[in-house]
Image (cartoon, helix red, strand yellow):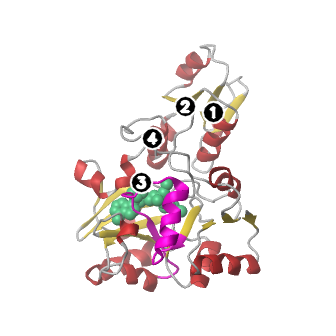
Amino acid sequence: MILSPTTENLSRAADVLRTGGVVAIPTETVYGLAGRIDNDRALGSIFHLKGRPADNPLIVHVSSTLEAQEVVHASAHGQLVRLAELFWPGPLTLVLPKADGVSSIVTGGLQTVAVRMPEHPIARTIIELCGSPLAAPSANRSGRPSPTTAEHVEADLGEDVMIVDGGPCRVGLESTVVRVLPDRLVILRPGVITAQELYARSGLPVDHAEDDADLIASPGTRYRHYAPNAVLTIVSSEEEAHVLLSGGDKNVMILSRPEVQASFRIAIIGSLTEHDLYAELRRADDLHVERIVVLCDEAVRGNEALMNRLRKASGDGNDQDPGT
Ligand code: TXA
Ligand code: MG
C-alpha cells in the first residue's frame, strides 16, 4: 500500500514502526525496509519479506549523532562524531565497534555495527517520530535491484507492506559503506561518496576492501546482488557494442550514457547513470529483455560505484548462493 507523505501518514507509519511493524521508507539513496532495532518481530519480518540470509547484517538508521552513539561502543565515539560532522546527513554508512545492547540479529553476529544518518527529510522525520533507530536494508527482494521508487518496492514486496512515497530517490545507488579503523578507512561498498572525497575531507588514508578478511567483515558483498534476468555484457567501445547488437538477438537493451546513445538504432535504449541504473534493470526485466549490452566508456569506468554495481549485475564475483 503506497501512502503519500502527508503529516497524518507519517505519524501512521511511525505508529506501525513503534508497535513492531515494518514500513518501507524513502531515503536519498534507495528505499529502505525499516523496523525498530530493538524489536525482534520487526527484524524477523525484514529478513522474511526480503528473503535475506540471516548472517547479512542490517544498517542502523538514525536521526541524530546522539542516537548513533547509543549503538556504537563508547571507545569509538570520538571517531564517530568527527566523521558524522563531516559527512552526515548523507549517503555514508560507518562501520564501528558496536555498543553492548545492540541485537545480534541487526549485526549478523558481528562485533561491529553499520550506522548512517540519511539526508532524506521523510526518513529522518519517521525515525524521529518513532523515537528509535531503525534497521533498514534496501527494500527489494534479495537478488533484485534496489528500489528507487515506491512502485519498485510494491512490485517486490507486494501490496500488504506500508510504503511511504517520497518520489524517485535522488542518488539511486546505495550508500558508501566504510569500516572505520583507528588510523584509516576501508571502503567495503563504493558509493557516491568516493575514496577521494573521504580522504580530502577527513585527512584519513582510505583503502579498499580486497582481501578475504575484509569481505568477511561485510557479508553482503558475498551474495549475488542487483541481478536482472537478462544476461548483462559489459563492453568498452561503441564498436564492440554494435558487433554484439548485430548478433540477431530479439530482445536486446543497450545501456549507455545519455550523451552516447545517438548511434544506436535499436528499440530499447537505457540510460546509464547512477540515478537511472536500477530503474533500467527493472525495466529490462519488465520488457523480458534477454541481453543487456552495457557501454562502459572511459567516463563510466571512472565511476567506481556504478562499475561495482554493473559487475555484480553481470554476475562477476557472485560465486555464492545465487538464490539470495
Ligand atoms: O543506501 C543504503 O545504504 C540503503 C538505504 C536504505 O539506507 N541500505 C542498504 O542496506 O543498502 P543493505 O542491507 O541493502 O546493505 C547493507 C550493506 C550490506 O552489504 C551489509 O553486509 C553491510 O552493509 N553491513 C551491514 N552491517 C555491517 C557490518 N557490521 N560490517 C560490515 N558490513 C556491514
Ligand atoms: Mg541491499
Determine whether 4 is above or below 226 in the image. Answer: below
Give how far apart the Cα atoms at labels 4 and 1 are. 23 Å
| Up/down of 82 relative to 57, above or below | below
Of mark 4 and mark 2, the one earlier in the sequence is 2
Residue range of the region highlighted in magenta in the rendering: 35-64
Are dots 4 and 3 in contact, CB under 8 Å? no
Q: Which residue is mark 1?
A: 260
Between 139 and 251, the residue placed more toward the observer is 139
Q: Earlier in the sequence, mark 4 or mark 1?
A: 1
Q: Which residue is mark 3?
A: 53
The one of 149 and 42 positioned closer to us in this rendering:
42
Residue ID for mark 4: 312
First reached walking from the N terminus: tag 1 or tag 3: 3
Comparing labels 3 and 2, the label whose residue is closer to the camera:
3
Q: Tag 3, which secondary structure?
A: loop
Q: Residues within 10 Å of mark 1 (few under 14, many from 20)?
A: some
